[in-house]
Amino acid sequence: MPRRVRRGVGCAAVVAIAALATGCVGFRSAGAAQPTQIGDVRVSVVVCAAQTSGCNGRGNSDTAPGEGASGQLLLGYRIPAGSAAPATLASARVAFAASEGYAAELQRLAPAPPGMRWVGYLSEPFTHTAAASAAGLAVSADFGLPATPGAAFAGPFPYRPVVGARSVTAATPASRPVACGDDLTALRGDGADGVVVCADAPGRGQIATDLSVATQDLAVVAGATGIPAPAGSVVAVPFTLRHGGRGPALAVTLSATTSVPGASAAPSPGTIVPVAGADHQALVVVGIPPGARPAVHGVTLRATVPGGTTREMTTRIVVRRPAGAAPAGSAAPRAVRFGWRHDRRARFYNLQVFSRARKVASLFPDRPARQVRLRPGRYRVVVWTGLDRASRERYASRPWVNRTITLRPAATAAARKRPLVVRLR
């Protein structure tokens, strides 16, 4: 260690930035928030020169920066292992870039516990002046919430910022590797005439502890995949919206798309206000064109909160050829007139008739009655209530009618000519 460092004036050879000193540094403030309600956590710090007004403590190196010294800042963050980190940091006066070497030194000397990791950043070189140090240097870093498929992050979000500094000279350029020695918090020699302290703040006893901020998150989960979708039919694709954590009430807008050419896709409901920590069900109602070709297609539900942050999920449907007007059979088809109780919410209805797993009819009457030609057999009849204009295809969350019936062959030729009236209850 050079003699001047042993005497406690080493920071004069280290410092600073065009806003504070590089070398012996601390935090004027440190905190975190979630600006976009369900999005990234923003950790904001104000770095200050040690022993200046408003700077917390004297720094682990217990020295003050020197006027006119040239150096770099080192900023490290301990964050959840699944959290994405930016490649650069936002600051008004000095640029920061990610440093894997500094992160490795932090991990070596202050290992992150299971489920956490260190990320490190180095500033560009700067020159310390007392006037600039008085204002401090504000730096912001946006970290993504840890992502788990099918789950929403429940929070809170733990974090720990640390700050250090090192000198920059002709013999110790800014491009050299970060070397912290045997102690993150000690001021030590670094090369021919340089010095470094890898964690001048917070205090030695605080580095192992975490700060935290409450968060909330939203996940969109597919309820099923590979749903059959015959050409000319309407299918309801289920999704779950899963809320995690706690925060201000969210007004979530839902939208939907599908890759089926010419198909419509509408969410039901269109908006939700999630209950904290709860699951909420939603449907995407997809209208398949009659001429759609058999193929596997995607259906996407997207949830958007005020400010534009989104969460989405895509599932698959299988478009098939239309089944035809009636099931195969030896008996002659006959007219069947279905009728059902009126739903006061209805703008139209979707009458669907199934023979086993095959849909044999899908009709859209505007009254609670419709005639279909069917052969004798066993059928499941489902009636959906349309809540808006047919072109918009917004449906109630549950069928208005869901009943199984058996049609027997007509006893006489005259009976075959008369429509068979079936009341659906």
Image: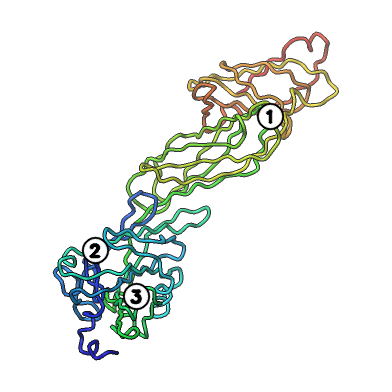
Q: Nearest to the eye among marks 2 and 3: give it.
A: 2
**Disc 2 to disc 1, C-alpha distance:** 70 Å
- Residue placed under numbered mark 1 in the picture: 380
Query: Label 2 sits on what residue type?
Result: Leu
Image x and y of residue 238, in percent? 56, 40
Q: Give the structural element (helix, strand or loop) at label 2.
A: strand
Three-letter code, disc 3: Ala
Q: For this view, does 188 lie left or right of residue 363?
A: left
Q: Disc 2 versus disc 3: distance between alpha carbons?
A: 24 Å
| Cα separation between marks 3 and 1 | 64 Å
Q: Quadrant of the N terminus?
A: bottom left
Q: Residue furthest front?
A: 170
- Out of 155 and 117, give the one closest to the viewer: 117
Q: Quadrant of residue 391?
A: top right
Quadrant in which the C terminus is drawn = top right
- Kindly identify which residue carries mark 2: 137
Identity of the residue drawn at 69% across and 24% down: 361
Left or right: where 127 falls relative to 289: left
Disc 3 crowd, CA 10 A, few/some/many (<14, 14-19, 20+): some
Q: Quick one: SS at disc 1?
A: strand
Q: How many residues crowd around disc 1 within 10 Å: few (fewer than 14), some, or many (20 or more)?
A: some
Label located before the other in sequence (2 or 3) = 2
**Residue for point 74% across, 10% down:** 418
- SS for tag 3? loop
Q: Position of residue 323 (x, y in %)?
A: 74, 28
Give the percent coordinates (x, y) of residue 286: 58, 32
Residue 208: assigned label = 3
